[in-house]
Image (cartoon, rainbow, N blue to C red):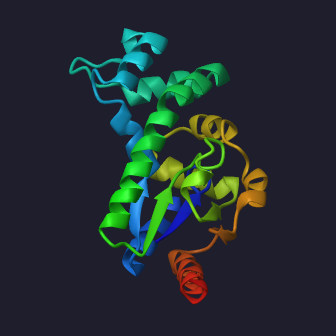
Amino acid sequence: MLVIGVTGNIGSGKSTVCQILAKLGAAVIDADKLGHETYKPHNPAWQEIVAAFGKDIVKSDDEVDREKLGQIAFSHPDALARLNQIVHPKAHRLAEERIEACRHQGAKAVALEATLLIEARWTDLVNKIWLVAAPESIVVQRLALSEMRSESQILARLKSQMPAEGKMKYADELIHNDGDINQLEARTTELWHKLHLAF
């Protein structure tokens, strides 16, 4: 079974690439969702997050208010580093379990979508790294429309992530997502078929 790490900064188009890969036959694992699973009330990560960031980030139903937590974390590099120290190891274990489950189910390929695949040192989980990259102006436009975030919020998040240029040396394949969906689908499909020729 081949595991493809699909990475890139927010708004680059990773999720769309993974949707295309799912249609082509890959199982998809979303690292963000695994991270959110670790936030479940009263589990170990939840307890550590509340201890580190205070009860103000907890809603009345004991769920972590991810919007509040994000505002704190993405405004202060030390806070973001602390949050990542808590969440990443636990999410990594969940990713290992999901990949193994896909293997048992007979999947031929898995796409692991992870923004911080390289920064969090999750490269041990994958066989190939595909980097999805888009110009900052396009990313801001996309996220402002889809998530209703302000430009300053989007730029703060982008600033907290390793630039795409820094990730290129780790990537086996680069997907430039500065065109339309048809171009993205064509490039993703081309790379998928290239994998099947090689494996």
Rendered view: 119 above or below 42: below
Q: Is residue 15 visible?
A: no
Across and down, in percent, residue 185 comes to 51, 79
Q: Is residue 132 left or right of residue 171?
A: left
Q: Is residue 97 left or right of residue 89?
A: left
Seen from the viewer's position, the closer of residues 197 and 53 is 197
Quarter occupied by residue 79 = top right
At 49% across and 29% down in the image, what residue appears?
70
Q: Is residue 135 visible?
A: yes
At 38% across and 12% down in the image, what residue appears?
56
Across and down, in percent, residue 8 comes to 62, 55
Rendered view: 177 above or below 196: above
Across and down, in percent, residue 166 comes to 78, 51
Residue extending furthest front? 104
Across and down, in percent, residue 17 comes to 50, 68
At 43% across and 49% down in the image, what residue appears?
95
At 40% across and 63% down in the image, what residue appears?
28
Q: Which quarter of the image is occupied by the C terminus?
A: bottom right
